Image (tube, grey):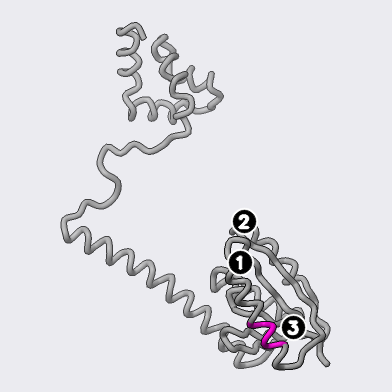
Amino acid sequence: MQKIVVFFRLNANFEESAKIEEKAIKEYLFENKIKKIDVVQVEISAPNQEENMREILELKANGETLLTYSLYSFGRTIQNIVSNIEKILENGFKIVVLNQNLVLIKDDMLTQIILKIMIVASDMERDLISLRTKEALIAKKNDGMALGKPKGTIQKSKFDEQRDKIEELLALGVSVRKIAKQLGYNNHIGINNYVKRRNIREISKSKDNNGS
């Protein structure tokens, strides 16, 4: 009997989902009287662990079928799913996906149609997200709602951690250019803008006048 490679994509943050997948796969193996299996488990609990997929993507088939629960096992974007499926098919596997009831085979016309439809759907969804965002912004604007950040909002800056030092040097009369050099910056423009937007010169003078 042909061997089956069972592929699990695990997420430590969603153990309940893993139990559902395991139950469905066990039922499939039992119903089809499949006993010769290899199991490949890939744990990806965060986006920066996607590299772990290489374990299954580099596996070469020897007539085996790859069984998994869902298309989502292959990625978290449609582009990644399609790309990873294509690599696995290229490596000689036939892919059986239980949840979506799919059988994917290299050079099979139906498989190619399914993958192309997925790509088109991905492009459409991206365009629809952009369109919904634009329409929502226009609707808010037409309702008189101000868009963007409130006027006067000050964003965080990389210079915030060194603000006390900047204030101290300004109070001593040190130029912004020299302050930038002392703090290790080749260009003083960023600090100059930082000082202006936060009125740090005035604050430093006020502290100096108050004996602070």
Residue 37 image offset from top left, x and y in percent? 79, 82
What kind of element bears circle 2?
helix
Location of mark 2 (residue):
48
Left or right side of 28 for 145: left
Q: Residue at x 41, y 18 (%)?
A: 167
Q: Up-down: is 115 above or below 123?
A: below
Q: Up-down: is 69 above or below 183?
A: below
Crowding at dot 2, Cα within 10 Å, few <14 / some 14-19 / many 20+, comes out as: few
Which is closer to the viewer, label 3 or label 1? 1
Whole-number angstrom distance, CA of label 3 to CA of label 1: 27 Å
The magenta-colored residue range is: 24-29
Q: Residue at x 59, y 89 (%)?
A: 101
Across the whole image, how many numbered discs are drawn on residues? 3
Crowding at dot 1, Cα within 10 Å, few <14 / some 14-19 / many 20+, comes out as: few
Q: Up-down: is 13 above or below 113?
A: above
147 or 69: nearer the eye?
Answer: 69
Location of mark 3 (residue):
93
Q: Amino acid at mark 2?
A: Asn
Q: Is residue 151 magenta?
A: no
Whole-number angstrom distance, CA of label 2 to CA of label 1: 19 Å
